[in-house]
Image: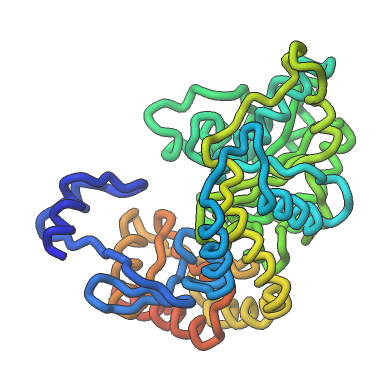
């Protein structure tokens, strides 16, 4: 194990990680080697509750037998084939399953990629290309919201409202106008806007910032009045995180583009999808020489293994009646955290903020929580609990108790 840690520090580079501290001689990285349900085990045999669903991805727990079996069965047939000019049964069945989940009949087409950023890139490129080749080329501007986060690829990052996540330069990518409220849209020239994009109900990387109730419905009314495309980034909020399958259901909104990733495969394999309408799809039809094709895609788009895992995850949602069990869990999570500073909640997403000039305090508290059997990750000084949806009431109580114990070490909560 010592040799592995030495190789780790010599050769690896981790995302969103201060590597000088990580590679310090006195730092022993946590190596996760096994998982079952909501529990993860490290290289020393210590067990932890997965308090952030492995970066907001895991829905049904680790080593779920139904998803394991689906992946194994598919692996016995073929692991991966190109989706460029070919197709396969798991993708066909998954596309049908996903469009059937969305209320109404607007979203009929599924475009598969491999992560949340590329799901956003697909939606944005589709929106811009649609207007350009369908008689309204002046629609070349996108509207995003302050403190938004839509991914780390160049185009997705240009939509973001958090400079820290844009890298060394912030002037790149698409033509973007940033607003902080629906009311500010009235001042814009809608005839030049291709699409408006938002994380519905709650902004994740902004520190689990809640939108006002009714805001999404008002945004939907504005875009319908001006025939502007609506892109919903449900990479985080999709698949039960807010208490319903999709966050947009809370305000009866169906967008033109619904971007999904993270929980799509239950947290097992990289897979993403951009769901869109027949109107958008038909805007790309034509003869090859017309150049109306959507020239965008990835080598592992529509992965056979990923689609098999996603189909199994959807079966688990149905057969285990996952959504029906969430209200009790959501209520208990809220009860246990209600008196913590800056507490807010959106379904199975719970957060609190410690007020401190020390911007590393959140990270220190999360590190302390490990001693009490909890793994989670802060957003600055915002502490988040977003467990797998399979979490039991007892596990929720243990997670909150561990968080409170860690907070107590820093006198950071009642």
Q: Position of residue 14 (x, y in %)?
A: 31, 48
Assign the C terminus to one quadrant of the image.
bottom left
Identify the image quadrant of the N terminus: bottom left
Please tell me which residue is depicted at 56% across the width and 56% down the height of the picture: 77
Tell me if I can see residue 219 in this picture. Answer: no
| Residue 202 relative to residue 76: left or right | right
The residue depicted at 63 percent of the width and 39 percent of the height is 145
State whether residue 50 is above or below residue 363: below
Residue 127 image offset from top left, x and y in percent: 73, 29
Compared with residue 354, is residue 300 higher up or lower down, i.e. above or below?
above
- Asked if one can make out residue 217 in the rendered structure from this viewpoint, the answer is yes
Identify the residue shown where x is 41% and y is 60%.
378
Q: Looking at the rendering, which quadrant does residue 27 occupy?
A: bottom left
Q: Residue at x 62, y 80 (%)?
A: 329
Q: Position of residue 367 (x, y in %)?
A: 30, 67
Residue 230: quadrant of the picture: top right
Q: Quadrant of residue 407?
A: bottom left
345, 74: nearer the viewer:
74
Query: In this view, which residue lies farthest toward the bottom?
Result: 394
């Amino acid at each position: 194990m010592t040799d592995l840690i030495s190789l780790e520090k010599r050769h690896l580079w981790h995302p969103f990680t201060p590597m000088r501290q990580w590679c310090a001689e006195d730092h022993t990285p946590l190596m996760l080697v096994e998982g079952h349900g909501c529990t993860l085990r490290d290289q020393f045999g210590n067990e932890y509750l997965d308090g952030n669903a492995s970066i907001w991805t895991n829905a049904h727990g680790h080593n779920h037998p139904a998803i394991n079996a689906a992946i194994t069965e598919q692996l016995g047939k073929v692991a991966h084939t190109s989706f460029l000019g070919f197709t396969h049964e798991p993708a066909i069945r998954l596309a049908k399953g996903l469009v059937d989940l969305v209320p109404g009949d607007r979203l009929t087409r599924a475009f598969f990629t491999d992560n949340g950023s590329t799901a956003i890139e697909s939606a944005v490129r589709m929106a811009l290309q649609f207007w350009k080749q369908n008689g309204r080329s002046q629609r070349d501007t996108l509207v995003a919201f302050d403190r938004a986060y839509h991914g780390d690829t160049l185009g997705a990052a240009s939509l973001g409202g958090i400079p820290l996540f844009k890298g060394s330069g912030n002037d790149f990518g698409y033509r973007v106008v940033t607003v902080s409220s629906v009311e500010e849209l009235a001042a814009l020239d809608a005839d030049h806007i291709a699409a408006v994009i938002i994380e519905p109900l709650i902004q994740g990387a902004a520190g689990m910032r809640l939108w006002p109730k009714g805001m999404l419905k008002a945004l939907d009314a504005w875009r319908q009045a001006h025939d502007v495309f609506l892109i919903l980034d449900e990479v985080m909020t999709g698949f039960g995180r807010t208490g319903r399958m999709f966050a947009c259901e809370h305000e009866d909104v169906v967008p033109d583009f619904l971007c999904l990733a993270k929980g799509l495969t239950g947290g097992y394999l990289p897979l993403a999808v951009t769901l869109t309408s027949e109107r958008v799809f038909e805007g790309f039809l034509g003869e090859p020489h017309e150049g109306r094709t959507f020239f965008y895609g990835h080598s592992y788009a529509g992965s056979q293994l990923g689609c098999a895992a996603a189909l199994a995850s959807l079966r688990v949602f149905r057969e285990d009646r996952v959504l029906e069990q969430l209200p009790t869990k959501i209520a208990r999570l809220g009860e246990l955290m209600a008196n913590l500073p800056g507490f807010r909640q959106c379904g199975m997403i719970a957060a609190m903020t410690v007020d401190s000039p020390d911007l590393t305090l959140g990270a220190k508290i999360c590190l302390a929580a490990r001693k009490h059997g909890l793994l989670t990750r802060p957003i600055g000084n915002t502490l988040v609990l977003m467990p797998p949806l399979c979490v039991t009431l007892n596990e929720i109580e243990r997670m909150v108790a561990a968080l409170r114990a860690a907070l107590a070490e820093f006198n950071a909560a009642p």
